[in-house]
Image: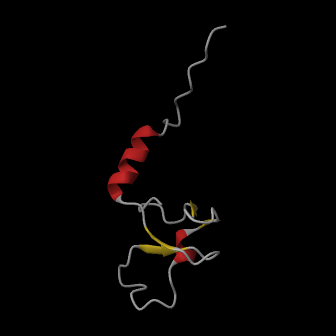
Amino acid sequence: MNPSNPKQPIQCPLCGHRFVPEAGRCASCPLAGQGCERICCPNCLYSFPAESKLVSWFRKLREPKSGDRPKESKS
């Protein structure tokens, strides 16, 4: 999950279900809404931590920029 973009869908590491993180907040948890960074899959109820800012930063470095095209190989 990208902390700066909570509308971006993420994939559950256990069942593979894709969902928007806002829908994956644990409603029955007493820490819900109090800064808890855990996400709960609405499909299998597996709870996992949100992606850290450091991981998001490295992921951004690896993504191609919107104006960049992959180099074409000459055959």
Residue lying at the far top in this picture: please name it: 75
The number of callouts visible is: 0
Quarter where residue 41 is shown = bottom right
Pick whichever, 51 or 68, lies toward us.
51
Residue, x 50% and y 83% (percent of image)?
26
Residue, x 36% and y 49% (percent of image)?
57
Percent from the top left, x then y, of residue 16?
A: 63, 62
Q: Is residue 65 left or right of residue 19?
A: left
Q: Is residue 15 left or right of residue 22?
A: right
Q: Tell me if residue 62 comes above or below residue 29 in the rendering.
A: above
Percent from the top left, x then y, of residue 33?
A: 41, 84
Residue, x 53% and y 37% (percent of image)?
66
Residue lying at the far front in this picture: please name it: 14
Q: Is residue 1 left or right of residue 41?
A: left
Q: Tell me if residue 33 comes above or below residue 16 in the rendering.
A: below
Quarter of the image where the C terminus is located? top right
Q: Tell me if residue 13 comes above or below residue 28 in the rendering.
A: above
Q: How is the image coloured?
A: secondary structure
Quarter where residue 44 is shown = bottom right
Residue lying at the far left in this picture: please name it: 54
Residue, x 48% and y 36% (percent of image)?
65
Percent from the top left, x then y, of residue 20?
A: 58, 68
Percent from the top left, x then y, of residue 40?
A: 52, 76
